Image (cartoon, coloured by chain):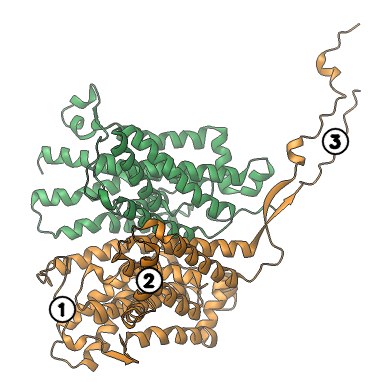
Chain colours: A green, B orange
Amino acid sequence: MNDTLLVASIASAISSSTAVLIAATGELLVEKTGVYNIALEGVMLVGALAGFLADLATGSWLLGLLVAAFAGGLFALLYGVITVLFRTDLIVVGVALILVAEGITSTLGTSHVGQSAKSVIPIWNVPILSHIPFLGPAIFRQSIVTYIAMLLPVGAAYLLNRTRHGLNMKAIGENPDAADTSGISVIGWRLFYTTVGGAFAGIGGAVITLGIVKDWVSDVTAGEGWIAFAVVFFSGWQPGWIIVGAYFFGSLSVLGDVGQALGWPIPSEFFTILPYLGTVLVMILRAWLQRRRGAVSWPAALGLPFYRG
Amino acid sequence: MTAVSPRSALSNYTRPARTRSSRLRWRIERRAQPLNLGLFRFGAVFLGILLSLAVAPLFTSASASTLYSSMWSGTLGTTTGLENVLTIAIPLVLCGLAASIPYRLQLWNVGIDGQIYMGAWAASGISYHLTNQRSFIIIPIMLLAAMVAGGLWILIPTLARVFLGVSEVITTFLMNFVALGWLMYWATGPWYAPSAAGGVFAIAIPTQADLGLLNVHNVVVNWGILIALSLPLVFWAANRYSRWGYEITMIGASEKAGRYAGMNVKRTLITTMLIGGALGGLAGALNLMGTNYQLTPGVTNNTGFNGLIIAVLAGANEIGVLVLGLVYSVLLSAGDAIQVVGGSADMVFAVIGVTLIFGTFGEAYARLHLVRTRPPEVPATKPVDAA
């Protein structure tokens, strides 16, 4: 493999991981409070279309991302209200909302299929670092959002481990009864973080339509929401591993292009399935390693409805 | 003389109780005695369907009367409509069963679409080698191959769930994409058949592998419908009267109880998931042999997801799966019918999602109620006297 191709592949792997990275970080915050938003795929789709339409209307990618965050947050809040407030089954409602999102976005987006985004997220060459021979073009010539996305898990780690509020969040996810007794609003914060996680996922979706694919097709997220969901499980609920998981996924998804460029005698469908198959296998491998170490790390109240008393 | 600090001057002052906490507040609480869950769920689903029908004209360019009349003639109003409904019902009921049987053990089979692909793939593959055989040999072999393929497809997520605790929701779903890629490889590669109409199609299966047609009062449906109508009854009976059904009921209620009773919990979990996968594969084969006749990605159209929804709304009751499967077939056929007058077929997915949310709300209403209470008075603490 020559250097140019390697550089291009690394750059492409990093940029195509961005959406998963953002969505997974948001989902981590949600799950730390004991709720999992399995409708992530649907939230990303809603964000992807909302951001795309706002971008078309205003010609500003930044407004697109903001609208995507708002739409994603609202859609996730709907999920939160149905599941957290009315104590319904997370998986059932998640599947239902994914279908709702697919139906609504394909219907509303019909007339825009194949249209390109008006303003795309710009590339920012980091001043000095981008001139480093090999690493520069590979890592430091990305879209602005990509750099921010890299910092998000760091911010999440700080929030969760270094602030009082983060400890409260973890208390809600580990032992909601204790948190409730000490005066923390369990339902309130769960709804809040479901919305925040949705806003993250919405931005993640819009990053696909405004930064990665740069146009709209039905079902544009193609399972990335599910992969983000899987990345959180894979991470063992640790922010650092979110980065590893997301970039692992990104690397698998560019492997197909590499294979094509080098003329590997492997059918292209194999590369299409690789990110999904790889995610499944890695989840199993990690669970197996954790089993051997005897460490189980999910928040103890994850997925359980909260009843006072 | 010492100066009195403002702080000690306040020491005898008791803070009045905060008004906010003593206000009447709305709260959601569990009912002491839950209402009839199934009744409220079904009622809410039908309410959701009616509501969706009522607002449907707002989302289409066609007039309300054209819309409703095309829905009626596309479903129950005409012979062709009825045939459509019954044909769609075949895979839908089977997928409902594929989800509902694991669901009795709180296991989620979200990978039914993948099992459909793999079932159809296996049935196609084996039929190419049996082109000289008669129908009564080739059809059972194809159905069997499809069931084995569907079962194998769910094997890895199942083992990962049972032995390592890996969430089967994620793994079974992600395997759908893998199955689609696998199907695309065969349909565009080794089994590729050029198609004038465009789209991905593999070589047609031999004609003697096509399912025969039944004619009841001029309504013509392939006899896969007999499988779809009878399997729910078979599984319903098995769940009530067989040892396997008893084990499922017991372990579904409490895994611990099952273990204490000496049941092999892991084996039951695995066999139940494999049966779910096999039913998904069977649905794929019946679609292939009854409607598509060629391996194509169109062999499933979110049928697996819809099956999952049916299973949940039916509360994993097999008879409920059959009834709701037929109801949802009517909905899906109506969705196909309104495309002709300018409606969007994708909207049907939204409608199905909405009915599912209605169903969960109905169930929530049966379990919870909204009460307006004042929080219990906190006894005021006596001010501590200064020594």
Chain at tag 2:
B
Q: Position of residue B78 (x, y in %)?
A: 35, 81
Q: Three-letter amino acid code at disc 3? A: Thr
Chain at tag 1:
B
Of the numbered discs in the image, which one, if any, rests on residue B1?
none
Q: CA distance from mark 3 to mark 1?
A: 84 Å
Of the numbered discs in the image, which one, if any, rests on residue B204?
1
Seen at 49% across and 66% down, the residue is B50
Q: Which residue is mark 3?
A: B381
Q: Nearer the viewer, residue B171 or B111?
A: B111
Indicate whether A13 appears above or below A140: below
Indicate whether A31 appears above or below B237: above
User: Does the image show residue B12?
Assistant: yes
Asked where in the image residue B41 lies, by quadrant, the reply is bottom right
- Between disc 3 and disc 2, the foreground one is 2
Q: CA distance from mark 3 to mark 2?
A: 71 Å
Q: Secondary structure at mark 3?
A: loop
User: Does the image show residue A239?
Assistant: no
Q: Three-letter amino acid code at disc 1? A: Ala
